[in-house]
Amino acid sequence: MLEIRPFKHADLEALYTISLATGHEGGDASHLYEDGRLIGLIYSAPYAALEPQLALVAKDDEGVAGFAVGTLDTKKWHDRLELEWWPKLRCEYADPSAIPPTKWSADQRRAFAIHHPERPPRQLVEAYPAHLHLNLSSRVQGRGAGALLFSEWMFRASQQGAKATHVGINRANARAVRFWSKQGFDRLQFQSGASSRTIWMGRP
C-alpha cells in the first residue's frame, strides 16, 4: 500500500538516501561519493527545509520510498538559497576551483555547484516559473508511484498559485524524459549557457 503524505522532519535522512540512490543518470550513485549527503543537500533537503508546504513523500510498508519537492517561483528560490542555504554549506565544503575540473572527484563537482550554482535559462523561468524534483527508490519504480506523487504535488502547487512548471533532466536519463513526457511536459529549447547535460521540459 502506497501513501502520499506531506514531508516530516523525520523523513530527511530518507531524502538523502533516495537522492543518492538516484543520483547517477537516475541510478545508484553511492559508489561515486565519499559524502552521501551531497546530492540531497542540493536537490532535496533545501526544499524540505525552506518550502515544506510543497514537499511530499511516498511511503510504502518499508518506509519512505520517494519524494517530490519544488517551488512556485524559481527566480525567488535561487535568491533565497543565496541568503539562507548556500552560505553555511560553503563553509563546510571547500571550493575546488583552484584544481583543474578534469581532476575533480564527484564530491568536488558537487562542492563546485554549491559555490557556483547554475541557474536555469531566464526565458525558461519567465515562461515556467515553478519547478520540482521527483525521485523514487527502485523498489517502487514502474508501479505508478511517480504519477501519484506528481499529481498530488501539482494539485497542491496549483492551489498555491502555480501556473506553469518546468523540470531539468540529465540528458542520459532517458527513463526520466519518458516519465515527464507522460505527465504532459514538452521538451524545450533555449539559447543559454546552461549545461548541455540538462534537458529542460515544461508544462503550461
Image (cartoon, rainbow, N blue to C red):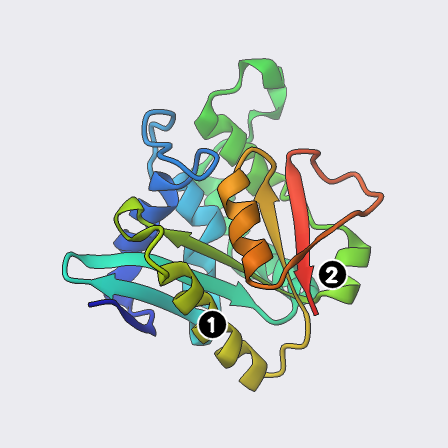
Residue at horizontal 64%, vertical 34%?
Answer: 197
Q: Secondary structure at mark 2?
A: helix
Quadrant of the rendered structure where residue 24 is?
A: top left
**Most extreme residue toward the right, as rendered?**
191
Residue at horizontal 79%, vertical 47%?
Answer: 189
Q: What quarter of the picture does the N terminus occupy?
A: bottom left
Residue at horizontal 44%, vertical 76%?
Answer: 53
Q: What quarter of the picture does the C terminus occupy?
A: bottom right
> Pointer 2: what residue?
125
Query: What amino acid is labelled 1 in the image?
Result: Ser
Above or below 130: residue 36: above
> Pointer 1: what residue?
151
Residue 61 placed where, x, y %? 14, 61
Q: For the image shown, how many numbered marks are present on the structure?
A: 2
Cα distance in 3D space between marks 2 and 1? 21 Å
Question: Which disc is residue 38 wearing?
Answer: none
**Most extreme residue toward the left, as rendered?**
61
